[in-house]
């Protein structure tokens, strides 16, 4: 690996290569990586034969300004680890919610049912659906791999979710209601299993946060593009049908060519019997041409073959 620099993992860009650290988190001007991709005269430029677009340069510069966080988000943190993609989106959602002073009751609704709200909260700057990211905290539950009892592991994970909901929004644990009603609090085992049923019937999915207006515009563009694709496909098919008559004319010429028939007879003798070449016209033409053992594939439906 040239220069000893690895950018495919956080430890690599933090440690740097033979030239030392290439990123100064929060300071793109002092970061060697940013200088290299901007083709600064005093450093070795990257990429060497081209330059990134202004958009790409801006993204990398902003990333370093943010502190160069690992864009892959966190993991389930169990033995061999597997990733929890897009976890950082919930983190950013949480920060925005605090900065925008979202009312607590609204925050709770988004946390438990943000993807079901008829009138979701929209970001004031870009119009994106903020509420739909609320239930993302449930994705932060731990996860095991290679479990021996799937049902037991499922119960363990859901119990953890319920416990987090209780401590976060009630200020007390409600996990003991898994077996019995709380002795002093108004929490019953029916409450516990109502939450259990809600979480058990939920599934992880990646929602589209774009505002409905933007989504409708893109859908309109896709429909127009699809119509254009269909039109071009039909025009191409029509051209093939138009040429079919000429193709069949040439095939019939071959069938009537005595010299060609004689040549094929010499190449394909059978019992000394002469052969004739014919064209079979049928609604169920196979999509190939056969001349004894020789197959000639075509784009149209007809069969060229030998008969005694």
Image (tube, grey):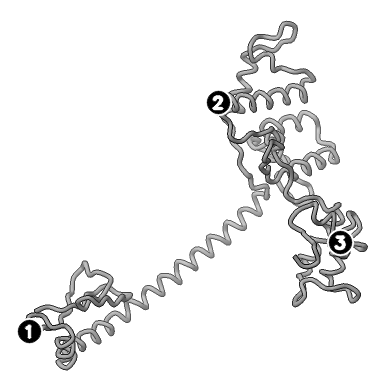
Query: Residue 45 location, x and y as percent?
Result: 82, 73
Instruction: Indicate the quadrant containing the C terminus: top left, top right, bottom left or bottom right.
Output: bottom left
The residue carrying mark 3 is 22
Q: CA distance from mark 1 to mark 3?
A: 83 Å
Q: Residue at x 86, y 61 (%)?
A: 22
Query: Quarter-wise, where is residue 96 in the image?
Result: top right
Pick whichever, 290 or 97, lies toward us.
290
Query: Residue 243 location, x and y as percent?
Result: 32, 81
> Of marks 1 and 3, which one's residue comes earlier in the chain?
3
State if disc 2 and disc 1 touch (CB < 8 Å): no
Q: Secondary structure at mark 2?
A: helix
So how many labels did they put on this image? 3
Pick whichever, 17 or 7, lies toward us.
17
The residue carrying mark 1 is 272
Q: Residues within 10 Å of mark 3 (few under 14, many from 20)?
A: many
Q: Residues within 10 Å of mark 1 (few under 14, many from 20)?
A: few
Q: Classify 75 as above or below 57.
A: above
Pick whichever, 58 or 12, lies toward us.
12
Q: CA distance from mark 2 to mark 3?
A: 48 Å
Q: Residue at x 87, y 59 (%)?
A: 23
Q: Classify 254 as above or below 155.
A: below
The residue carrying mark 2 is 151
Query: Residue 279 location, x and y as percent?
Result: 17, 79
Q: Secondary structure at mark 3?
A: loop
Query: Quarter-wise, where is residue 292 in the image?
Result: bottom left
> Of marks 2 and 3, which one's residue comes earlier in the chain?
3
Q: Residue at x 58, y 28 (%)?
A: 200
Q: Classify 242 as above or below 88.
A: below
């Amino acid at each position: 690996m040239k220069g000893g620099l690895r950018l495919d993992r956080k430890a690599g860009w933090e440690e740097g290569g033979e030239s030392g650290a290439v990123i100064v988190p929060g300071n793109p001007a002092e970061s060697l990586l940013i200088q290299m991709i901007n083709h600064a005269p005093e450093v070795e430029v990257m990429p060497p034969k081209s330059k990134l677009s202004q958009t790409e340069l801006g993204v990398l510069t902003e990333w370093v300004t943010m502190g160069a966080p690992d864009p892959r988000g966190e993991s389930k943190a169990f033995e061999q680890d597997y990733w929890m993609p897009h976890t950082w989106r919930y983190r950013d959602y949480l920060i925005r919610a605090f900065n925008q002073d979202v009312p607590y009751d609204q925050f709770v609704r988004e946390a438990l049912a943000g993807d079901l709200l008829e009138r979701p909260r929209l970001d004031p700057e870009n119009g994106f659906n903020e509420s739909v990211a609320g239930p993302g905290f449930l994705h932060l539950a731990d996860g095991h791999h290679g479990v021996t009892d799937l049902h037991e592991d499922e119960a363990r994970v859901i119990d953890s979710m319920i416990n987090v909901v209780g401590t976060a929004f009630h200020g007390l644990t409600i996990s003991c209601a898994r077996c019995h009603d709380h002795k002093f609090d108004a929490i019953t085992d029916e409450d516990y299993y109502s939450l259990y049923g809600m979480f058990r019937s939920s599934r992880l999915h990646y929602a589209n946060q774009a505002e409905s207006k933007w989504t409708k515009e893109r859908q309109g563009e896709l429909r127009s593009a699809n119509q254009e694709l269909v039109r071009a496909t039909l025009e191409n098919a029509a051209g093939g049908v138009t040429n079919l008559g000429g193709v069949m004319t040439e095939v019939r010429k071959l069938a009537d060519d005595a010299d060609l028939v004689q040549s094929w007879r010499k190449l394909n003798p059978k019992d000394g019997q002469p052969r004739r070449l014919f064209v079979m016209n049928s609604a169920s033409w196979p999509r190939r041409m056969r001349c004894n053992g020789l197959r000639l594939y075509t784009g149209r439906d007809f069969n060229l073959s030998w008969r005694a």
